[in-house]
Image (cartoon, rainbow, N blue to C red):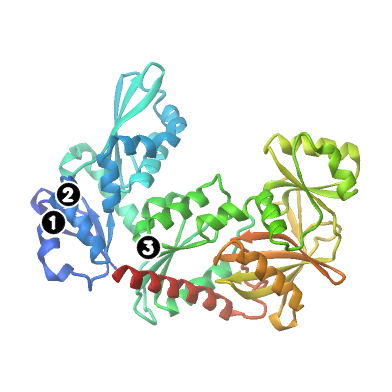
Amino acid sequence: MSNLIVVSNVQHWPLKIPDVSVISAKEYLTDPAYGGHLRARVYNLCKSYHYQSIGYYVSLLAEARGHKPLPQVNAIEDIQSPGLVKLLTENLDELVQKSLAPIKSEHFDLSIYFGRNIAKHYDPLSRELFNLVRAPLLRAYFDRHGEEWRMRSLKAIAASDIPPQHQDFVVQAATDYFSKRKPWLHPLIAPRYDLAILHDPSDPEPPSNAKAMKHFEKAAGELGMHVELITRSDMSRLAEFDALFIRDTTFVNHYTYRFSRHAAAEGLTVIDDPNSILKCNNKVYLAELLTRHQIPIPRTVLVHKDNLEHIIPALALPCVLKQPDSSFSLGVVKVASETELRQKVKVLLEKSELIVAQEYLPTAFDWRVGILDRKPLFVCKYFMAPGHWQIIKHGEQAQDFVEGMTQAVALEDTPAKVVKTALKAANLIGDGFYGVDLKQVGRHCYVIEINDNPNVDAGNEDGILKEALYQQIMAVFLRRIEERKQGNRR
């Protein structure tokens, strides 16, 4: 894929950035060489983005040609609207105050070059504004009102607006930005689409281990998709891709949810989608949903500050208390006495107005059914951690945990009731990628939870399908990308 920097006048472009072609806006708009047959990322650095200006048409036609413009036309519209700028930045107030606190003057201009500022202190704020607006060269204007700083406006700037003393830094910032892309070497099939996989290299319990990530990359490549691993700092680049696969632990009040929402808004194929993250991450919602649709779950009480006395008569002891957004066995506690129950409920209700209490069902293992596109994909038995009542036993440190054994089971060897119940539960959420956990007690089967973003680890969940597991997941991405693009052409 070509990287094109499009400027109003090439003669006025002062920077030399390696491995990037610099062309004029007129050339881009009129030369057939830059038509829809070309796979290109277009970095629009024209002097003006005003409506129906030449800069406006560069981004507009780049989208029409299937190129990947930065900024997109909707971002250009956002920049022009003071009201939208205020709305976009209202969640950054704490970061603004922290970043600008040392400044003594009444006004401050922040220059943002590919998400960075020449002073490293302003990089966090620069990166967030770049992520929101997605224009390569920006300037944010702030005014002091009493003790608080407020953004007056946010504008895209042209290369001619870069001070001479900043030019070497801008070259380095741009070079670093472009160098994040891995070259596509010796492809089996020429890449047709770009897939971003969001991950956190520092996560001690990632949804997919390093070997699984390599399998995903290989499977995608065989289908003609170029994979790039991205991290939380790459939100501004989402418009460059055709799809986003989240292999990072998801939460609602978290960058993973914002990534999913941004990607969906940009029209990318997203797994998992924001709706799935929102619903699966709240156990209060799941308990209510599953009960309404008569899907068996352990006896459950939705607990608030006024119904504590109902828990023991309804569930007996021991019972399990769950924070609504608990995951990986964190935020889930077993209580065995009334005193402990009262203490733990009080702590959990300090974080949420409602929590979940469920009867304790001891089993040697939990069933996990992986479901994608409303079809069962894999099945595993997750055994309890040695000497513990959960599949993961956590220590005091994040890296200090012990997991029970995982055993892959063929779909045809799994009790039909387990698969049928899991599929019925997951279909209430959507057509994303889900891991449904169930307990089997005698002839009865109970759904414990529905997880978005389920684990796929090499050596565990792929124990039966091997590489075919990764190929099937990537095939769903390919089909959805192509269906979306065909729909856009109608």
Q: CA distance from mark 3 to mark 2?
A: 22 Å
Q: What residue did someone put label 3 on?
A: 241
Q: Are marks 1 and 2 in contact (CB under 8 Å)?
A: yes
Mark 1 or mark 2, which has the lower sequence index?
A: 1
Task: Tell me if residue 136 can be seen.
Answer: no
Q: What residue did someone put label 2 on?
A: 46
Q: Which mark is residue 52?
A: none
Q: Image quadrant of residue 440?
A: bottom right
Task: Give the residue type that dot 1 points to.
Answer: Ala
Task: Give the residue type that dot 3 points to.
Answer: Phe
Is 95 situated left or right of 6 in this image? right
Q: Which mark is residue 25?
A: 1
Q: Are marks 3 and 2 in contact (CB under 8 Å)?
A: no
Q: Secondary structure at mark 3?
A: loop
Quadrant in the picture for the N terminus? bottom left
The image shows residue 67 at horizontal and vertical percentages of 27, 64
Q: Secondary structure at mark 1?
A: helix
Q: Categorize mark 3 by other alpha carbons within 10 Å: few (<14), some (14-19), many (20+).
A: many
Mark 3 or mark 2, which has the lower sequence index?
A: 2
Q: Secondary structure at mark 2?
A: loop
Task: Give the residue at x 41% y 51%.
Answer: 235
The image shows residue 106 at horizontal and vertical percentages of 31, 19
Q: Is residue 463 above or below residue 112?
A: below
Task: Tell me if residue 256 can be seen.
Answer: yes
